[in-house]
Amino acid sequence: MPTHSPSRSIPLPARRFWPVITLTSLLLGGCEQNTFQPPPPPKVDVAKPVQRAVTRYLEATGNTAPVKSVDLVARVQGFLQSIDYKDGETVKEGTQLFTIEPETYKLKLDQAQAAEAGAQASLKQTEADFKRQSDLVARQAVSQATLDSSTSARDNAQANLQQAQANTRIAQVNYNYTKVTAPFDGAVSAHLASVGELVGVASPTQLATIVSLDPIYVNFNVNEQDVLRIRAEARRRGLTPSDFKQIAVEVGLQTEDGYPHQGKLDYAAPTINQSTGTLAVRGIVPNPGRVLLPGYFVRIRVPTERNEKALLVPDLALGTDQSGRYLLVLNNDDVVEQRKVKTGPLDGGLRVIESGLAPEDRIVIAGLLRVIPGQKVDPQPHPIEQPAATSRSGQ
């Protein structure tokens, strides 16, 4: 009878746990294969700063004023005979505007001229008598007293002639005052006296006002900080006070785009106003089309300096914290760094960076909320759009 070796069999309780053991082994094996994979660096748009020439401007508001403004008055007494212009008319220098009863003053002029002619005749007679008496005294035909009397008569006649000539000039001036003329080219206001009205009785009577419109002044004020900056820049460039009158002034009305009117600086006050801390400045602007009228409220800008290699970045790329403005800049390893910068004027949509940035730096221009300093990023080069240059200071 053959001998059988006992068969190996798993006890019944162990068979029940075999699937569990197998499943556990599989799960443990799977956990050993899954390792942590960090997320990829975030993609951000980066660009190098724009480098171009930028002009810095001093901006202000001011008012226009006439270069010349004169009240036309009656300088002689009389009835206003005629008004020889139309209210508001633009006239040339020397144009007759008013006539004040000239007849009386013409008669006085004629009277003075007649007296002057009589004085000239008297002087001629006394000079002849003086010459005759001088000859007689030389021949000892008459006494020295006779010559002295003749000399006195001649001198008196000369004085009378001078008096008559002065009276003639006075009469001529008064006669000329009966015609009120334009002292310069300009626009004349509405008349303030009517024909037939007695003017110039107790004091000069105002008849109208004439103002010049071309060129025209623009008056504005500059604060003390801007004055210090401009003077420092002038010293750096070696400018003299006379050079300031060559600085351009650009003017624009409230309804105009930009600054279409060009002029030059004309005057700067010698002292700062202590009550306002400002310096009074004046420009002069050609106004051939009479677009600018005295009293207008205008926008003014004056170029103060020009940087030929200014660096500009999008204004939205700048951040702000308690220490000031900053940019997010990538280093050579594409790691974000926070760079403190000093900002300048806004040029269109781009901000001038005065310090803290180099031309070769790569700055984050989009996706700023997805990155933090010290983080590695995936840079995506993206050129900076350059809007039209409209540099303005103080922004």
Image: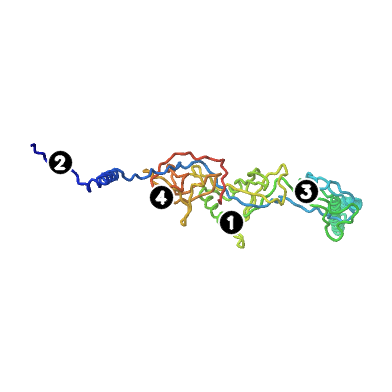
Q: Which mark, residue 373?
A: 4
Looking at the rendered structure, the kind of residue marked 4 is: Pro
Q: Nearer the viewer, mark 2 or mark 3?
A: 2
Q: Given the current orientation, which residue lies at the most extreme left position?
A: 1
Name the foreground residue: 313 vs 393.
313
* Residue at the top extreme of this rendering: 2
Quadrant in the rendering for residue 347:
top right
The disc label shown at residue 183, or none: 3
> At 71% from the left edge and 52% from the top edge, which residue is drawn?
295
**Is there CB contact under 8 Å for labels 2 and 3?**
no
Which mark is first along the chain, 1 or 2? 2
Query: Which mark, residue 122?
Result: none
**Which disc, if any, is residue 223?**
1
Q: Which residue is mark 2?
A: 7
Q: Nearer the viewer, residue 269 or 312?
A: 312
Q: Earlier in the sequence, mark 2 or mark 3?
A: 2
- Mark 4, mark 3: which one is toward the viewer? 4
Q: Earlier in the sequence, mark 4 or mark 2?
A: 2
Q: x%, y% of residue 200?
A: 86, 57
Identify which residue, 151 or 309, lies in the foreground: 309
Disc 2/disc 3 C-alpha distance (Å): 141 Å
Upstream in the sequence, badge 4 or badge 1?
1
Is disc 2 placed on a helix, strand or loop?
loop
The answer for how far apart the CA atoms under marks 4 and 2 are is 71 Å
Q: Amino acid at mark 3?
A: Pro
SS for callout 1: strand
